[in-house]
């Protein structure tokens, strides 16, 4: 069994990003990301802090906008409009989930697609599903980088994704399909998930339920990507896979923590850099 070390790979990628950021900054384009945090959900605060720390490490400017939980929809939209109009800003990230009174879809649609480094705008998700270059959500992007790094073949493989959210399961299914896999997406209403997972070559689990995937559900030699994050009462973080009993059967598996999490953050940095590079080429074209 090979452990897919996302932390190590993310560190290597970060070093490359830092070099490119320095080069761009010397040309007068410092990659910049605006992060909007609404309310004071502790998990969201942790994620936002992790992203800010990673930006700082590679030289990307990140600006955090902390807004009260009771912010009105129109005020949030107005704020995004200002950020859209700021020509020195490459990315706008809205930390999810937003409070229940906010229409999240409308907020995500209000971000200019070329600043949508989270890849949640329908223009970017449409491009992804059509196999056209755009911004791809960070978690699926990071998973594909990790699989590529470990030379895991996807073409012609049976891939099962458990979890069908807009931020993980659905975009990941599009990437896998574009890479030539035969993809099944399972979710809360899927009958007999075992019948899918037992024949899968690659299983990606993104549900948020510990021990969802157990050893009797997988075949020997499977590759498993565990995306889930579950905090136990003792503070320990675990994924969705019964790691102790499933990992001996695997060819490759990601640990939690240290697998998909660091790859997600580094992919956000890659997207921000990509946006800054596009800005730099727009500037040089206009000179
Ligand atoms: P979500 O709640 O939006 O979606 C969960 C999905 O799981 C849904 O499609 C639902 O139908 C499905 N589901 C729920 N119960 C199920 C069951 N018993 N059997 C099969 N399917 C079931 O969640 P999300 O935002 O996609 O996140 C999923 C998990 O991944 C969470 O634990 C989240 O914290 C984690 N996550 C991790 C990263 C990372 O960087 N590591 C990034 C994003 C999300």
Image (tube, helix red, strand yellow):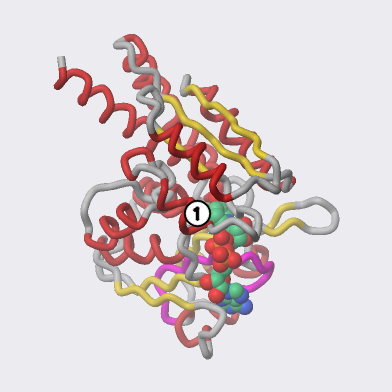
Q: Start and end of the magenta stretch?
A: 199-215
Residue at (14, 21) in percent of width and height: 285
Left of 257 or right of it: where is 159?
left
**In terms of image quadrants, where is residue 216?**
bottom right
Q: Is residue 54 above or below residue 122?
A: above
Q: Horizontal and vertical percent for residue 186? A: 48, 78
Residue at (50, 54) in percent of width and height: 2
Q: Horizontal and vertical percent for residue 48? A: 61, 38
Quarter of the picture holding the C terminus: top left
Q: Horizontal and vertical percent for residue 143? A: 43, 52
Left of 4 or right of it: where is 40?
right
The residue wearing badge 1 is 2
Classify the position of ligand 1 by quadrant: top left, top right, bottom left or bottom right: bottom right
Task: Specify the principal SS of the magenta part.
Answer: loop
| Nearer to me, 42 or 15 | 42
Residue at (32, 17) in percent of width and height: 24
Residue at (54, 85) in percent of width and height: 189
């Amino acid at each position: 069994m090979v452990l897919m070390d996302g932390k190590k790979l993310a560190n290597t990628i970060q070093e490359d990003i830092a070099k490119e950021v320095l080069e761009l900054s010397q040309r007068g384009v410092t990659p910049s990301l605006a992060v909007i945090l609404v309310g004071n959900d502790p998990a969201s605060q942790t994620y936002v802090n992790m992203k800010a720390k990673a930006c700082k490490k590679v030289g990307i400017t990140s600006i955090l906008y902390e807004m009260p939980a009771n912010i009105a929809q129109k005020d949030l939209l107005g704020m995004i409009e200002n950020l859209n109009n700021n020509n020195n800003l490459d990315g706008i990230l809205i930390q999810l989930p937003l409070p229940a009174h906010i229409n999240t879809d409308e907020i995500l649609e209000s971000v200019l697609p070329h600043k949508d480094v989270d890849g949640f705008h329908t223009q970017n998700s449409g491009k992804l599903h059509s196999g056209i270059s755009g911004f791809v959500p960070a978690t699926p992007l990071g998973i594909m980088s990790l699989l590529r790094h470990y030379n895991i073949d996807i073409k012609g493989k049976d891939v099962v994704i458990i979890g069908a959210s807009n931020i993980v399961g659905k975009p990941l299914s599009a990437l896998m399909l574009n890479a030539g896999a035969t993809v099944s997406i399972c979710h809360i209403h899927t009958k007999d998930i075992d019948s899918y997972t037992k024949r899968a070559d690659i299983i990606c689990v993104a549900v948020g339920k510990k021990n969802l995937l157990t050893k009797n559900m997988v075949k020997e030699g499977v590759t498993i990507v565990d995306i889930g994050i579950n905090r136990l009462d003792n503070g320990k973080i675990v994924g969705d896979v019964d790691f102790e009993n499933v990992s001996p059967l695997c060819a490759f598996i990601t640990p939690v923590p240290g697998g998909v999490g660091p790859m997600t953050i580094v992919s956000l940095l890659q997207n921000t850099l990509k946006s800054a590079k596009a800005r730099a080429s727009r500037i040089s074209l206009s000179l």
